[in-house]
Image: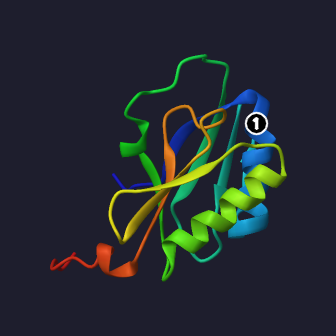
């Protein structure tokens, strides 16, 4: 088997806002859309992100450990830029940190079971030959 995509739940009220944020700020393109879900991808990569509409009222208490993760030379600034966009578009969002190299964006009204993480590229350097 080969990895194809990850799926996460987004509150239905903010679904289109989250999709638009990824399109506008991170250059995601829409691959396919159904009544409940959308598949998106950043150009140049072959792993997709699926978001599914959710009407669940509860949020996972430890969801900050379930991330959609990105690499960035300045991860805090990148996430703060996303938070500014989200807040300006009616989606309350804040930035937190795991360390001085790893940060996360949470939009608790929208993100049911995940946060968006950004980390410096050296965090993804592994001494392994695939």
Q: Position of residue 60 (x, y in %)?
A: 44, 27
Q: Position of residue 47 (x, y in %)?
A: 51, 61
Q: Is residue 52 left or right of residue 24?
A: left
Can residue 58 be seen at all in this image of the molecule? yes
Q: Residues within 10 Å of mark 1 (few under 14, many from 20)?
A: some
Instruction: Tell me what residue is drawn at x 60 percent, y 18 percent.
Output: 56
Mark 1 lies on residue = 14
Instruction: Tell me what residue is drawn at x 50 percent, y 47 percent.
Output: 115
Q: How many marks?
A: 1
Q: Is residue 63 left or right of residue 123?
A: right
Residue 30: quadrant of the picture: bottom right
Q: Position of residue 78 (x, y in %)?
A: 59, 71
Q: Position of residue 126 (x, y in %)?
A: 21, 76
Q: Is residue 83 left or right of residue 74?
A: right
Q: Is residue 98 left or right of residue 71?
A: left
Q: Secondary structure at mark 1?
A: helix
Q: Nearer the viewer, residue 17 or 35?
A: 17
* 13 over 117 or under it: above or below: above
Q: Nearer the viewer, residue 107 or 14?
A: 107
């Amino acid at each position: 088997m080969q990895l194809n995509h990850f799926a996460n739940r987004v509150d239905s009220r903010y679904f289109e806002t989250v999709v638009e944020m990824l399109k506008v700020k991170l250059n995601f393109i829409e691959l396919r859309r159904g009544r409940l879900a959308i598949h998106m991808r950043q150009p140049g990569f072959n792993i997709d992100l699926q978001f599914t509409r959710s009407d669940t009222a509860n949020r996972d208490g430890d969801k900050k450990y379930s991330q959609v993760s990105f690499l960035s030379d300045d991860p805090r600034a990148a996430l703060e830029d996303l938070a500014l966009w989200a807040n300006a578009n009616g989606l309350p969002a804040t930035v937190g940190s795991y360390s001085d190299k790893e940060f996360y964006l949470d939009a608790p009204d929208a993100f049911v079971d995940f946060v968006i993480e950004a980390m410096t590229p050296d965090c993804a350097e592994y001494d392994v030959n695939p």
